[in-house]
Amino acid sequence: MADGRWTIRTRLAAIYGLTVLLAGSALLGITLLLFERVLTNRPVNTSIVVAHQSTQPSPATDPGTQGQAVGTAIRPSTPPTEDDASFRLAEELHADFRRSALRDLIGQGSLALAVLVVVGAWLGWLVAGRTVGPIKQMTATVRRVGDGSLHERAALPGPRDEMHELADSFNDMLSRLDSAFDRQRRFVANASHELKTPLTISRTLIEVSVTDPAVREPLLEVNLRQERIINGLLHLARSDQGLVDRAPLDLAQLTAHVIEGITPAANVHVISQLAPSPLQGNAVLLEQLVQNLLHNAMQYNEENGSVWVHCAPFSGEARLRVENTGPVVSPAEAAQVFEPFLRLGERSGSGDGSGLGLSIVRSIARAHGGDGSAIARRGGGLVVTICFPAASRQDES
């Protein structure tokens, strides 16, 4: 039983036990009814009463002996009547036997029924376990797929039955999804690579050929923004491909290195509180993640604003939290900041970003088995939290 709800296996075992209880109760009731009817419809055998009376000696007395017995006499073997004491005694004994037999049958039958219900529920638990086993395997596969492992497949042992057909259909769907996502990632990566070269050439031509600063600067700004978008798409495609190489590292140490090398925005103060947070991951991608978080926190800030960076292990996870001052963000907007091409600058007046920074952050986090969340900060700004499985948990998985 999980979260107060019965599992399928528990419900099946309870159904099996209830079925045995109902069937056993019906069988016991029918048996009692037939047994009672047989005993009721079977009258007392009067010949047995007569034979019993015939064999009973009766003492005879002689007046001269003053009551002493001198011999025996045989009672007459006349049939008893309903008013005869022997007949009434036989009837009472017969009724008492019927009641005792029914009472014993009810008691012993109920005990046997209780044992059958327990055995039936136990056997139902075993049978349900074998039935639900393939479903548990498929559930585990779905969870691994939900973490981004589209190459996972549900391999079910046993005969080719309905469960196997369901698993085969599920595997076919995963294969098609994996192929579709792989084609999409390759397309984004190839298109980004193809677009980088003409943009670089375009920037060079603008710098060389355009002499008027009033025309050159806007063109260079547009060109730079296009390069940022393409670089973001490249990072997004690279992180979506999953991790090939993992290495032990300290998220706090990596974050401190990024903070030292980053150029803070004007009048924005960065305050860090870092505790050792070991995990297994790709240092290049994680460094990109921290850079995007800090860049986003400083870009969408206010004059004399602050950025708080907190990194520490928490509940078996390596947790990185970046909090910043800035424009007021509604809860609905905070829930959508990880969407691609969504820029807070469209609401706060700054449109310098590509709209892919936090999308890349979440993609890299999920590639490491983690995830990201964002909530609106009271008074303005955002609180972005990224959680990763700790090194010990990653080793177990």
Image (cartoon, rainbow, N blue to C red):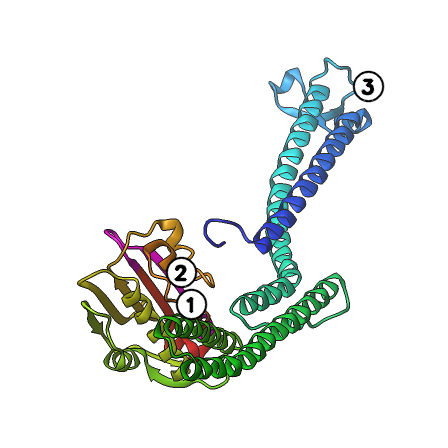
The Cα–Cα distance between marks 3 and 2, rounded to whole angstroms, is: 113 Å
Where residue 203 appears, as percent x and y from the top left, is: 44, 80
Would you name the residue on which mark 1 appears?
A: 354
| Residue closer to the observer: 335 or 218 | 218
> Residue at image x 32%, y 55%?
348
Q: Quadrant of residue 313?
A: bottom left
Is residue 343 visible to the viewer in this orientation of the structure?
yes
Region of the chain picked out in magenta, as a range: 365-382
| Residue closer to the observer: 347 or 4 | 347
Is there a contact, CB below 8 Å, between mark 3 and mark 2?
A: no
> Which amino acid type is shown beneath numbered disc 1?
Ser
Would you name the residue on which mark 3 appears?
A: 79
The disc label shown at residue 343, or none: 2
| Residue closer to the observer: 263 or 215 | 215
> Which amino acid type is shown beneath numbered disc 2?
Arg
Furthest residue to the front? 212
